[in-house]
Image: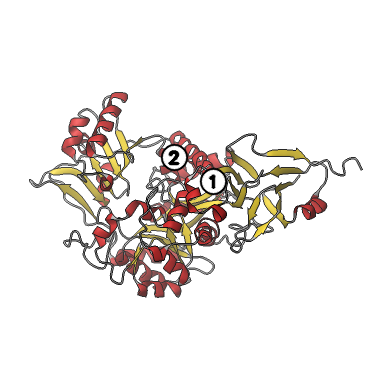
Amino acid sequence: MGTIWMGGTIYTMKQELDMVEAVYTEKGTIKDAGKLDELEQRYGKPGIEFVDLQGGVMFPGWVDSHMHLIGHGETFLKLQLGGCTSREELLEAIRIQTELLPEGMWVIGEGWNENDWENALLPEREQLDLAAPRHPVLLRRVCRHVIVVNSAALQAAGVNESNPGVSRGILGRNADGELNGILKEQAQEFVLSAVPGVTEEYLETALTAAIEDCWAKGLTGCHTEDLSYYGSCDRVMSAFHKVLNEKQMHFRAHLLVHHLALNEWLEEDKGKHYQSPLLEFGAMKLFADGALGGRTALLSRPYADDPSTSGVAVHSDEELEQLVIEARKHGMAVASHAIGDGAAEKVLRNLEKYPCPKEKRDRLIHGQILRPELVEQMKRMPVITDIQPSFVASDFPWVMDRIGEPGSLLVYAWKTLLQEGISCAGGSDAPIEKVSPLEGIHAAVTRTKLHQQTVYGEKEQLSMYEAMSLYTKGSAYAIGHEGDRGIIEKEFAADFTILKHDPFKEGPDILLQDLVQMTVVNGEIVYNKNRDYILKIQHMKNSQQ
């Protein structure tokens, strides 16, 4: 039988402030929407259910357009260092962790950001050796483009002073030329490859934790990139299948295919035996540059605070071109990480030279630094920008120290992109940032840090409708689902996010409260903050007739 959702404010997101009084769903699909009495007349019969929103505010289900779902789940399984306020606090967290783990077991931590510390000194090998003399230690910076390790980790990986450098990365050394434990970009693989592998049970546990947290944040799905980081590509796909389909944890996962996992994915028949309404595969993922925090994002000019570098190109021009050719050969769109304008220029040149297959869309992931001529180029192409509004709150004001006087550079210019007709989708890049569409929408609208007043780039502030659209219509459009997801409309997916208060009426600061009351995927309530909040009743009208 079907369900009528009623008793609150329901925004369709088809247009700004477009609303309906009630929605009728059946078998995971929206069958009708409109006035309550008309839906009652049309569908009222014995056995139908009503869900009373009790004044709540319903939106089409929010989807995070860029995250690492397993990685987010791992944050519940690993040492989290994002809250550290100094190098000393980080080192103390490592020392405490060693007391909890058997000698020789790896201490894995992530999320630290020296830019948030009063004294922005990087942790190095020497300090980690003192904090953990009997455990290998590996700590990933928040951007995931830098790791720092201790001597035990270097020894386990077979890395020593005689190791050569790598062309697409940096093997850090101190003033005496000795390894300092800092590894950037592809140099990270020296140690990452030595970390003991994960089991399928571990993957399923991480996925379960991640999805449950996403539900609580109002997310009904995500676009994620996990296939190349956990050993066998097939094992990762199997873990997704077991959690989403066999365990019936309703959540819509759209997996990008990292170029390093492409061949195995192709050998597995593109994962077709795992595909379902909850699990699908999309564009080929590649990296064109690094991150601004570590000065590895590729700019078209030197960094203002370190003129010796303009960043790092992860691939040579020839390699990048061949990767795009390979994607097109298999009928795939390309989703490229490109933070700096130098990287965006290289990527767009190839995407335009080798056009995207019909009915598919390439994506520029992040696109934080652009130039007007690159935006003009994008307007000629089927390319969207996959933005992370929370980066505004995280990166300013220090990012301007990296860039210097912007001049013609477009810096986190989300409003400009939308005004120029460039479609944008909204994500978090979790676990680099928190999985919180509420905080992402707040950052997009206010361009401020949480609980602060300084506005960073006022002319780039989005309206509430534009910001909400990033996580609804924007995420759907990015993967070609604008015909069945992203708005409340007949024959669209019955995926909903229900809030306690209305941000359109109460303003952006209400978004900083714990607003999510319920999350619905495929017509099923997967998260209900208050068990007695929703009243389901059997519709007995006409049953006595």
Q: Residues within 10 Å of mark 1 (few under 14, many from 20)?
A: many
The picture places residue 266, in percent across and down from the top left corner, at 46, 54
Residue pointed to by mark 1? 218
Q: Is residue 334 left or right of residue 81?
A: right
Placement of the N terminus among the 4 image quadrants: top right
Expressed as whole percent of the image width and height from the top left, the position of residue 492 reads 65, 56
Instruction: Tell me residue 217's x, y (percent).
Output: 51, 44
Q: 159 or 136, which lies in front?
A: 136
Residue at 52 percent of width and 60 percent of height: 474
Dot placed on the residue nearer the N-terminal end, 1 or 2: 2
Q: Quadrant of the C terminus?
A: top right
Q: Which label was assigned to residue 73?
A: 2
Q: Residue at x 77, y 53 (%)?
A: 39
* Left or right position of 482 against 314: right
Q: Is residue 499 visible?
A: yes
Asked if the residues shown at circle 1 and circle 2 are in contact, with their CB atoms under 8 angstroms apart, the answer is no
Between 38 and 383, the one lying in front of the other is: 38
Report if residue 65 is visible in the image.
no
Provide residue 517's location: percent of width, then percent of height. Answer: 58, 42
| Dot 2 amino acid type | Gly
Could you say which is closer to the camera, residue 221 or residue 349? 221
Residue 35 image-quadrant placement: bottom right
Secondary structure of the residue carrying tag 2 is: helix
In this rendering, the answer to whether 38 lies above or below 232 is: below
Residue 325 sits above or below residue 136 on the image? below
Secondary structure under tag 1 reads loop
- The amino acid type of the residue labelled 1 equals Gly
